[in-house]
């Protein structure tokens, strides 16, 4: 038994302490673990520093390329240059964590309240109704017909009634128990009406938990962009999608930081970045001509909208039915 602070080695058994393979040097040829295993606080601190510097080195090698040369980064990783760059999955998880942390810290997620929106909408409808009634009174005093105003007033009152029913936790007219809607739909609508903020919290939780689903949702569409490229594999598309999504998450993070700093107008300009980034990544990763990359970028923007719609629908369903 080694005393505390000693170095545990595999020299006595000439086998790796991790996998049991025979040792022939300072590292195991089978699993890569060191032969000398420090068992001390100094060794722990050394592993911590080495890990930080290793990640930092990969971070500064990966991030600039992700921003300015995303196609080259994707291609080099696919072709086997793995040790110098952060893996797409690790970068994606890191980006998702930072994005949701920034959105939560800035209050963006906590400020999404449905009840407040209903109250505001109800007040606006009430003000509009009062104006219509004033117009009708003025029209009556002038001896003019009021049929058109009466129709607008009736419609406005109906809309106000629908909003009031939602605020009170009752289903609006047409979605009530007397309707022909299936029970599961009525229950879902009732939950949205009676517990809107709880549903929104569930949606936010599901989005952060299942954000990885964007990758398998996107890869089949990427395959359809290159149906006759035999030298392109699903792995290549997965790397492309994951790096691209990582950049978009970091872009949202940058926008959140700008909003927190009071530079919301500059944050809006970031909306121009995704098409340019997708074009550069497509052109570099798949070695496309400019016109081919441009066409595929246009298609990919439509695909991204479809994928986000599917993902958003799935997260909404999880939020409602969970």
Image: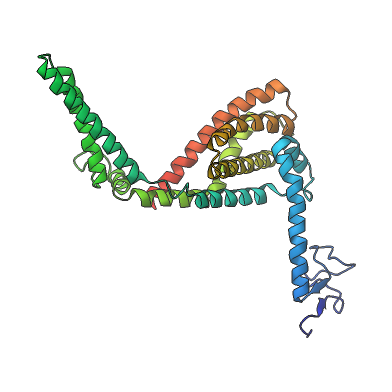
Residue 322 visible in the picture: yes
Residue shown at the point (79%, 51%) measured from the top left: 83
Question: Residue 129, position in %: x, y?
Answer: 21, 30
Colouring mode (rainbow / by chain / secondary structure / one colour): rainbow
Q: Is residue 165 left or right of residue 8?
A: left
| 234 to 303, vertically: above or below | below
- Using residue 191 as the reference point, say whether residue 111 is left or right of it: right
Q: Which image quadrant: the N terminus? A: bottom right
Total marks placed: 0
Instruction: Tell me what residue is drawn at x 23 percent, y 47 percent.
Output: 168
Between residue 10 and residue 55, name the one nearer to us. 55
Q: Who is closer to the viewer here, 129 or 38? A: 129
Where is residue 155 shown, x and y percent of the image?
21, 27
Q: Which quadrant holds residue 316?
A: top left
Q: Outermost residue, right direction?
A: 25
x and y percentages locating residue 123 in the rendered image: 27, 37
Q: Is residue 30 above or below residue 159?
A: below
Left or right: residue 77 versus residue 216 is: right
Which quadrant of the view contains residue 176? Answer: top left
- Quarter residue 220 falls in: top right
Report the residue at 59% width, 34% height from top: 270
Rendered view: 11 above or below 200? below
Q: Nearer the viewer, residue 74 or 270?
A: 270
- The answer to whether any part of residue 232 appears in the image is no
Residue 9 in the image, given as x and y percentages of width and height: 83, 76
């Amino acid at each position: 038994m080694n005393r505390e602070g000693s170095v545990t080695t595999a020299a006595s058994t000439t086998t790796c302490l991790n996998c049991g393979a025979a040792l022939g040097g300072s590292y195991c040829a089978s699993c890569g673990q060191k032969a000398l295993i420090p068992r001390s606080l100094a060794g722990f601190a050394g592993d911590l520093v080495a890990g930080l510097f290793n990640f930092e080195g990969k971070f500064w090698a990966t991030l600039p390329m992700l921003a300015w040369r995303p196609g080259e980064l994707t291609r080099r990783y696919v072709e086997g240059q793995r040790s110098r760059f952060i893996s797409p999955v690790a970068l994606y998880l890191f980006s998702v964590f930072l994005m949701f942390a920034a959105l939560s810290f800035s209050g963006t997620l906590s400020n999404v309240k449905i009840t407040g929106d209903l109250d505001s909408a109800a007040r606006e409808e009430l003000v509009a109704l009062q104006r219509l009634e004033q117009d009708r009174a003025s029209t009556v005093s002038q001896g003019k017909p009021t049929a058109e105003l009466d129709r607008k007033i009736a419609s406005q009152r109906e809309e106000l009634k629908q909003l009031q029913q939602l605020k009170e936790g009752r289903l609006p007219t047409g979605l009530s128990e007397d309707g022909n809607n299936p029970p599961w739909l009525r229950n879902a609508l009732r939950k949205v009406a009676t517990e809107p903020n709880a549903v929104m919290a569930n949606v936010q939780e599901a989005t952060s938990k299942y954000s990885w689903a964007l990758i398998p949702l996107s890869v089949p569409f990427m395959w359809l962009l290159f149906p006759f490229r035999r030298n392109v594999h699903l792995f290549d598309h997965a790397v492309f999608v994951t790096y691209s999504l990582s950049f978009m998450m970091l872009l949202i993070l940058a926008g959140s930081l700008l909003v927190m700093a009071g530079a919301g107008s500059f944050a809006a300009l970031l909306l121009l970045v995704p098409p340019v980034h997708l074009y550069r990544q497509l052109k570099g990763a798949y070695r496309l001509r400019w016109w081919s990359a441009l066409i595929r970028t246009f298609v990919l923007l439509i695909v991204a909208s479809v994928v986000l719609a599917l993902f958003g629908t799935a997260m909404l369903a999880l939020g409602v039915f969970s």
